[in-house]
Amino acid sequence: MTDKPAPEGRYAYDGLDRVLHEKARLGIVTSLAARPDGLLFTDLKNLCHLTDGNLSRHLTVLQEAGIVEIHKGYKGRRPQTLTRLTDSGRKRYLDYIAVLEAVLADAVEAAKSVKKVRRVLPEGFSPA
């Protein structure tokens, strides 16, 4: 092979925030990013297709990380929960998206280069 190796750690993507990278939490934060006034628990649950317990647990993780703020209130006699992104949560989300864009750019670049190269096994290797 004549390709130069990638710089060490090139594809480590250390900027991928582990709190945000989980599928359900990413859906929650993306839903909230589009709605600066926040979303009610039921609306968020439906948008993300989560159960009450799953949504509640993920919101706790996001709240403890300072990504969302949760407000309790009432509409008439019915309790309601409103969730919004914090300012720092919005910044973390945007930083995370920037890293995802780099991942996608690398993936596209890698896929394009593979199409042009005939894949040959190095000497001494055989299919497993």
Image: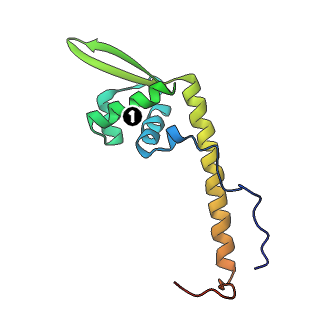
* Residue 41, percent from left and from top: 32, 28
Q: Kindly identify the residue that appears in the image at 27 percent across and 38 percent down.
A: 51
Q: Is residue 69 above or below residue 77?
A: below
Q: Which residue is mark 1?
A: 58
Q: Kindly identify the residue that appears in the image at 66 percent across and 59 percent down.
A: 106
* Residue 46, percent from left and from top: 30, 38
Residue 114 in which image quadrant: bottom right
Residue 119 in which image quadrant: bottom right
Q: Secondary structure at mark 1?
A: helix
Residue 78 in which image quadrant: top left
Which residue type does callout 1 highlight?
His
* Residue 94, percent from left and from top: 60, 36
Q: Quadrant of the N terminus?
A: bottom right
Q: Kindly identify the residue that appears in the image at 51 percent across and 83 percent down.
A: 128
Q: Is residue 123 left or right of residue 48?
A: right
Foreground pick, 6 / 98: 6
Foreground pick, 29 / 12: 12
* Residue 123, percent from left and from top: 69, 88
Q: Is residue 61 above or below residue 7?
A: above
Foreground pick, 62 / 46: 62
- Residue situated furthest front in the rendering: 124
Q: Is residue 69 left or right of residue 126?
A: left
Q: Is residue 32 left or right of residue 93?
A: left
Q: Kindly identify the residue that appears in the image at 40 percent across and 28 percent down.
A: 60
Foreground pick, 10 / 127: 127
Few, some or many C-alpha atoms within 10 Å of disc 1 (few <14, some 14-19, many ≥20)?
Answer: some
Q: Is residue 56 left or right of residue 38?
A: left
- Residue situated furthest left in the rendering: 77
